[in-house]
């Protein structure tokens, strides 16, 4: 079978390995069909990933495939089912798993800290698999993970169920795939009418305008704001801000742009840096961090199945596995919204 491994930064190997299948109870053998490349995969390849990671690593945590064999008495998953799965390998036994499996004390990440799904055959515990309708395109299903991440971030808001009634003035900072997923969910599912998108790249702004009709704005960098109430209020205009870039400077702008009592939700891996947190205190902001999408897949898969034509537009390039090294070229990455690899 084919297997794709990042052996070290900027070193990608495609090899053929013998498939030896040991199928323990409550496991399934899955034929992986499609891998969606995440920003994390790109950073792993470049050696710039901020979180825990290991090399060598079979990457891939956004994927879809077909079940070939099941060892279970349960009818949850059957041969021939279309499936996708968690990025987080949670234990289900710790205290953290009781309230959010994405915060598991023993967590591992498929394709980041342990081998993932960029291989044709994978044995997967059933607890990490999610069945999709037969009508759902595998290329769309392979985007369920980052949509689940976006959905989980929205649900961090205590008032998320009332968003349609509240109609907050909302800003999404960053028009990458998670930023676009946030936009699609907020505008289509939660029916928000005031959702703005900031994006630094003129090329990406043009891309999402052509693909989705989104008039993304060039970011307004907030600099030297007087730390008086009048000064802080002069630039604050958004009730809800999602930081989906993963840069300290963007987070700083988010803190300034949020109105008193507003919320800033961080889904980007910010790394280290210096931030002026005075506006957070003076404006009584709610700062929330969110990671992972475990717990959201059932709703996400149903949403994707109902909105396939729209979501499919997020994929702007598909590479066969034999040419996948080209998908990690920074120039290619900058020219695309979401790249997929077909195994």
Image (tube, rainbow, N blue to C red):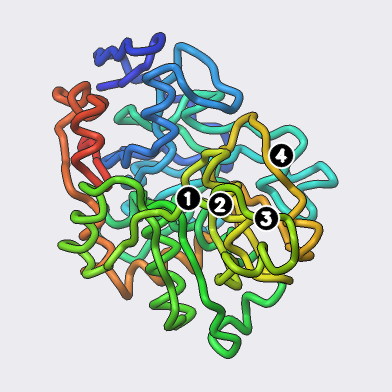
Sequence-wise, the earlier of marks 2 and 1 is 1
Name the residue: 62% across, 57% down. Answer: 256
Q: CA distance from mark 1 to mark 4?
A: 42 Å
Q: CA distance from mark 3 to mark 2?
A: 14 Å
Q: Are marks 3 and 4 in contact (CB under 8 Å)?
A: no
Crowd band around label 4 with a 10 angstrom C-alpha radius: few (<14), some (14–19), many (20+): some
Q: CA distance from mark 2 to mark 1?
A: 6 Å
48 or 151: nearer the eye? 48
In the displayed structure, 121 sits above or below 98; it is above
Sequence-wise, the earlier of marks 2 and 4 is 4
Disc 2 on helix, strand or loop?
Answer: helix
Q: Are marks 3 and 2 in contact (CB under 8 Å)?
A: no
Q: Nearer the viewer, mark 3 or mark 4?
A: 3
Q: CA distance from mark 3 to mark 4?
A: 48 Å
Sequence-wise, the earlier of marks 1 and 4 is 4
Residue 221: give its label: 1
> x and y percent of residue 207 in the render?
19, 54
> x and y percent of residue 145 in the render?
45, 50
Query: Which residue is under mark 2?
Result: 253
Q: CA distance from mark 2 to mark 4?
A: 37 Å
Name the residue: 54% across, 58% down. Answer: 242
Disc 4 on helix, strand or loop?
Answer: loop
Crowd band around label 2 with a 10 angstrom C-alpha radius: few (<14), some (14–19), many (20+): many
Name the residue: 54% across, 41% down. Answer: 249
Sequence-wise, the earlier of marks 3 and 2 is 3
Q: Are marks 2 and 1 in contact (CB under 8 Å)?
A: yes
> x and y percent of residue 84 in the render?
41, 49
Sequence-wise, the earlier of marks 1 and 3 is 1
Name the residue: 66% across, 63% down. Answer: 231
Disc 1 on helix, strand or loop?
Answer: loop
For residue 333, which quarter of the picture? top left
For residue 336, which quarter of the picture? top left
């Amino acid at each position: 079978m084919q297997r794709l491994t990042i052996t070290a930064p900027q070193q990608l190997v495609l090899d053929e390995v013998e498939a030896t299948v040991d199928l323990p109870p409550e496991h399934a053998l899955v034929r992986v069909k499609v891998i969606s490349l995440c920003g994390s995969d790109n950073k792993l390849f470049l050696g710039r990933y901020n979180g825990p990671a290991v090399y060598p690593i079979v990457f891939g945590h956004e994927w879809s495939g077909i079940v070939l064999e099941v060892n279970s008495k349960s009818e949850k998953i059957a041969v021939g089912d279309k499936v996708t799965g968690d990025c987080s390998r949670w234990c289900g036994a710790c205290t953290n798993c009781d309230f959010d499996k994405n915060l598991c004390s023993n967590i591992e990440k498929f394709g980041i800290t342990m081998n993932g799904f960029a291989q044709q055959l994978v044995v997967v515990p059933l607890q990490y698999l999610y069945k999709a309708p037969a009508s759902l395109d595998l290329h769309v299903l392979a985007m369920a993970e980052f949509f689940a991440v976006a959905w989980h971030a929205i649900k961090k808001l205590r008032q998320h169920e009332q968003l349609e009634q509240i109609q907050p003035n909302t800003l999404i900072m960053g028009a990458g795939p998670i930023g676009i997923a946030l936009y699609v969910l907020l505008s289509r599912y939660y029916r928000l009418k005031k959702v703005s998108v900031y994006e630094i790249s003129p090329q990406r702004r043009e891309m999402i305008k052509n693909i989705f009709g989104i008039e993304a704005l060039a970011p307004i960098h907030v600099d030297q704001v007087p730390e008086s109430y009048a000064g802080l209020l002069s630039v604050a205009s958004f009730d809800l801000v999602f930081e989906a870039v993963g840069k300290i400077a963007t987070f700083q702008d988010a803190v300034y742009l949020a109105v008193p009592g507003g919320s800033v939700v961080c889904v980007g891996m910010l790394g280290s840096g210096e931030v002026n947190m005075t506006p957070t205190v003076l404006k009584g902001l709610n700062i929330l961090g969110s990671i992972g999408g475990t717990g959201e897949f059932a709703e996400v898969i149903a949403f994707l199945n109902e909105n396939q034509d729209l979501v499919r537009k997020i994929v702007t390039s598909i590479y066969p596995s034999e040419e996948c090294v080209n998908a990690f070229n920074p120039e290619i990455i900058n020219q695309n919204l979401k790249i997929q690899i077909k195994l």
